[in-house]
Amino acid sequence: MIDQLLNARLKTCIPNVYPSVAPTAYALPCAVYQLLETQVTTDLDGSVSDEGFVTFQISISSESYGQAKILARAIRNSLIIWRENGVETVEWLDEHMMADTTTQATLHRALLFFKFFTTV
């Protein structure tokens, strides 16, 4: 469920959003999100809860460094205040900027890492 909610939330900041991997012919700018970790919580009686922490990496790709930074800031600002539909807390973990020269045109990438406490 968090995947669909995150996809919709990201689309408020960037038009092209893809889960896991971008398609071969993707449009720029875009964001690709990947689930990195799920930590379910247990209740006091030891039973597994339907809530837990999930960590996502969000990779933003753009043709310009400035646009990648602007989109990263917009996504960061949107997610750190996000409290709806079972998303209870959001923690911004890290951010990295890099260039990708493996494609025909150099792409500028922003990698954002977030941890959410939500229904898993």
Image: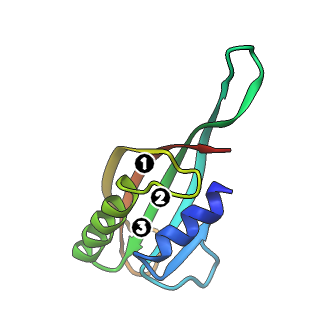
For marks 2 and 3, give the CA distance: 6 Å
Q: Which residue matches tag 1?
A: 113
Q: Relative to 12, does residue 87 appear above or below in the rendering?
A: above
Q: Which amino acid does the dot numbered 3 rest on? A: Ile
Residue lying at 67% horizontally and 15% vertically, measured from the top left: 44
Q: Secondary structure at mark 3?
A: strand
Return the residue found at the far right: 47
Q: Earlier in the sequence, mark 3 or mark 1?
A: 3
Q: Relative to 56, does residue 99 appear above or below in the rendering?
A: below
Q: Which amino acid does the dot numbered 1 rest on? A: Phe
Viewer-proximal residue among 71 and 102:
71
Query: In the figure, is residue 17 to the left or right of 113?
Result: right
Query: In the figure, is residue 33 to the left or right of 90?
Result: right
Q: Which amino acid does the dot numbered 2 rest on? A: Ile
What mark, if any, has residue 60 been given in the picture? Answer: 3
The quadrant of the rendering that contains the C terminus is top right
Q: Is residue 118 visible?
A: yes
* Residue 106 at x, y percent in the picture: 36, 75
Query: In the figure, is residue 109 to the left or right of 47?
Result: left
Q: Is residue 31 visible?
A: no
Residue lying at 55% horizontally and 71% vertically, measured from the top left: 8
For marks 2 and 1, give the CA distance: 6 Å
Residue lying at 42% horizontally and 80% vertically, measured from the top left: 29
Q: Are the two marked residues, 2 and 3, in contact with CB atoms closer than 8 angstroms?
A: yes
The residue carrying pointer 1 sits among few (fewer than 14), some (14 to 19) or many (20 or more) residues within 10 Å by Cα, namely: some
For marks 3 and 1, give the CA distance: 11 Å
Q: Are the two marked residues, 2 and 1, in contact with CB atoms closer than 8 angstroms?
A: yes
Viewer-proximal residue among 99 and 14:
14
Q: Secondary structure at mark 2?
A: strand
What mark, if any, has residue 58 been given in the picture? Answer: 2
The quadrant of the rendering that contains the N terminus is bottom right
Residue lying at 44% horizontally and 47% vertically, measured from the top left: 114
